[in-house]
Amino acid sequence: MTQKITINLNGADVTAEVEPRLLLVHFIREVANLTGTHIGCDTTSCGACSVVLDGKAVKSCTLFAVQADGRRIMTVEGLVTGGQLHPIQEGFHEKHGLQCGFCTPGMMMTSYAFLQNHAHASEEEIRWAISGNLCRCTGYVNIVEAIKYADAKLHAPAAGGA
Amino acid sequence: MGVAHGMGHSVKRKEDARFLRGRGNYIDDIKLPGMLWLDIVRSPLAHAKIVNINKEKALATPGVAAVITGADLVPYKLEWMPTLMSDRQMVLPVDTVMYYAQEVAAVIATSRYAAADGVAAVEVDYEPLEPVLDPKKALLPDSPVIRFDREEKSNRIWHWEAGDRQGTDAAFKGSDVVVAEDIYIPRIHVASIETCGCVASWDPMEGHLTLYMTTQAPHAIRTVVALVTGHLGLHEHKIRVVSPDIGGGFGGKVPVYPGYVLAVAASVLTGKPVKWIEDRSENLQADSFARDYHIHAELAAQKDGKLNALRMGVVADHGAFDSAANPSKFPAGLFSICTGSYDIKTAFTEVDGVYTNKPPGGIAYRCSFRVTEAVHAVERMMDVLAQKLKMDPADLRALNFIRPEQFPYKSAFGWEYDSGNYQGALDKAKQIIGYDDLRKEQAEKRARGELMGIGLSTFTEIVGAGPSHTFDILGIKMFDSAEIRVHPTGRVIARFGTKSQGQGHETTYAQIIAQELGIPEEHIAVEEGDTDTAPYGLGTYASRSTPTAGAAGAMAARKIREKARKIAAHLLEANEADLEWETGKFFVKGVPSRSKTIQEIAFAAYTNHPQGMEAGLEAVDYYDPPNLTFPFGAYICVVDIDRGTGEVKIHRFVAVDDCGNIINPMIVDGQIHGGLTMGMAPALLEEIVYDENGVNLTGTFMDYLLPTAMETPKWELDKTTTPSPHHPFGAKGVGESATVGAPPAIANAVVDALSHLGVTNMDIPLTPQKVWAVLKEKGAAL
Ligand code: FES
Ligand code: FES
């Protein structure tokens, strides 16, 4: 038994016949072949699979693909626009916020969603925001710095006067 | 023209470009035409006879292509495989399972989901056997012997000792003070965020195997696969191992696990590529386990605190098979670094490796072979002694440090420490954290009934294995390698025998070559991990990449420079001896305008090389280090303990590290941040726990707790620099220092907070439950 669904991934519709039990993360990785979204656990603990669903960060291992039918998803592959890195990507590069890179897409998508509705966030707020995303390499110090970098860049006071 | 940023520059990482865009190429991203999926049936019991395996329902499941059991492997002699420790391990059991979650059968199917359906449909009947779980009881004469396949009827795998037993006994007798503690360092799991996996692709026409695999040591794996399959006609020249981007290794991706071998067997059986990717729960239950050391530690000293002798006895729980990855001559790894940073004249240690009905353990969790265990024991004992003598632990350490002028220093166990300045690092750490004021603050808080503790760790590591006279794995010497080719246009491809798992080799290795040849690092492509192209090396673990392959990179570059000198002499019509090197060019002594850049020389190497000289500009180096390297550091941790909940909060943590000369400070700091967090993890949170039946109770990330950003403090870093005198550019390696040094600093802080209640030792992890129980017992709980 399969079901036909259409999910808008990074602006493009992807339509496929899927089993109702297919996890969203497997749809993204194996049906749409967007392998930037990763899998690190089976208990909704690690956040390696984080994507942005209709503006909110979600763990794509914990939704069925059919639940995302007709909805909009943004993955790490959607961060670059016009060949330009998004400030969050820039921040991770400039501040050495990644080592093995495995947690990085999920970390960036969670941060992306967080910075959509938080400006000038405190260290504590940032740490809380990413506390559902595990990183085994960086000790989080530089990830926090990366998010601060992006926060500053995204929410810079408009250049005024003269 | 770019600029060469060699040593000491925080060059931003080259590898980031693909990772930031979601274009990394990790194992589960590899998809080959016609690929099948493999999933594994695992044992629900820790020790049992297999009465029957019924495949029928599984074979009738849609999409399932085959089911493989141990019996199916017997005709090919593949039911056992050799381990790196000269033991052997079951690929699949024929009649007896040895541990909970052991691989019992493999299902091959057309999709991930169909394979999982097939696993659920395999029916296995077991007859339970009594599991042997306590390694100390396993050594008693009346214990059942679990390894029925061995001639020796004992659960003892080996007994290993080092040092001077009689001398140490005598020194203990003649000492004023003796302290002793039992210290258990529990089983933990590396838990890289990417689990293990592979894609095996067998080409029946060519008789060729390509194995994409999460491995830290691709060349060694190629040789091991050839040894396992040689009798089936698959030889080493027909095997290509490719280690793609690795999502964290930390030692867990050094050994060979049954899943890899099963994927190879399944690919040969089906003639199709086969992918095997572990689930997290499989990973946490079946492989990548470390530590599990039951230590009895003793120190003997004079009244004034001067150390006389050290003695340590260890029972090491290795699980059902000795599948650790230690150098051959060191079944207990480098545990004999346990005299630490101290001038201890006499010492003795003995270790018994023991089989139990647990999955194989003993790999290194981000440390050089058993160094963390050794450091934890000696650093903990220094505090125990200080407490007994009512001395400040910093003063006791200062009194006993090996002094700078004693280097090279020969330890009681025979290691030759290359260089160090332990007091310098400790002074710096004390000054940064304001040690004396902290002690005052602690006294005030104590008077108010608050629990604050200050813990020190002044550790020495032993990394960079290693010199070929002493170090080998399965007989293969532990050198490492680099091959550098300078193209006619001055651009470079460099390949190494190691394999980055996040350490940033593509950047740092390019910087080493930039330093040696003056070629901009952005003109240098670095490759690792493909055995068809990279020179043979032993891989990345034990902080060995910079000490070995990094050194090989420098040496290969120096060979190139020597050839470049000859070409430059020819081009400048000068005498070789009259040429001087200055980053990126040779010039005639005293006439700086008469010069040739390395790029001009590279072009000439292919277009205008001297008569009688081979064309080209390339070199290979297999670097055999003359000694190990001994990074060190001084860490100070301040904790507050909540008397109501037993929760330990790290209030401050200052880490002063010394890893010799630094290639890329940004990357080194990143390694230390990560290492400290992986040091805090087992100190406060992580432990693999088995119930009385040998069932793993911590098999998911909901029970096995990795630190999140909330528990992880803001680490405060600083450095001292004491170059290694024998390394080509004075580096020592840094990937694991912090994981080794941090746990005792934290444990010492917690015990220090409770010392006035009469607490002398507590085993990690110092969980709220454990701490609260002690508070309760001592009447200090709120
Ligand atoms: S894969 Fe771990 S939370 Fe989704
Ligand atoms: S960078 Fe490796 S897990 Fe975060």
Image: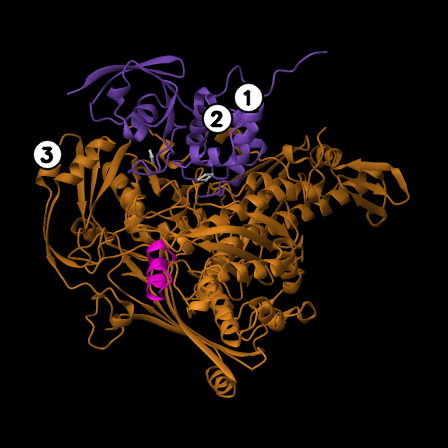
Chain colours: A purple, B orange
The residue that mark 1 highlights is A154
Q: Residue furthest front?
A: B448
Q: Is residue B362 left or right of residue B171?
A: left
- Quadrant of the rendered image containing residue A72: top left
Q: Out of A22 and B414, give the one closest to the viewer.
A: A22
Residue B31 coordinates in the image, percent (x, y): 34, 30
**Discs 2, 3 touching: Cβ within 8 Å:** no
Disc 2 from disc 3: Cα separation: 42 Å
Tell me the amino acid under the disc marked 3. Answer: Ala
Q: Is residue A80 left or right of residue B567?
A: left
Q: Residue B20 — which label?
A: none
What is the chain letter for disc 3?
A: B
For the record, the magenta segment spans B765-782
Disc 3 from disc 1: Cα separation: 56 Å
How busy is the neighbourhood of tag 1: few (under 14 within 10 Å), some, or many (20 plus)? some
Quadrant showing the N terminus of chain B: top right
Is residue B215 visible to the viewer in this orientation of the structure?
Answer: yes
Q: Which residue is found at the position 40% from the left and 64% from the top?
A: B762
Tell me the amino acid under the disc marked 1. Answer: Leu
Dot 1: element: helix
**Discs 2, 1 touching: Cβ within 8 Å:** no
3 or 1: mark nearer the eye = 1
The residue that mark 2 highlights is B21
Q: Which residue is found at the position 21% from the left and 70% from the top?
A: B145
Q: Residue B60 — which label?
A: 3
User: Magenta stretch: residue B746 in it?
Assistant: no
Dot 3: element: loop
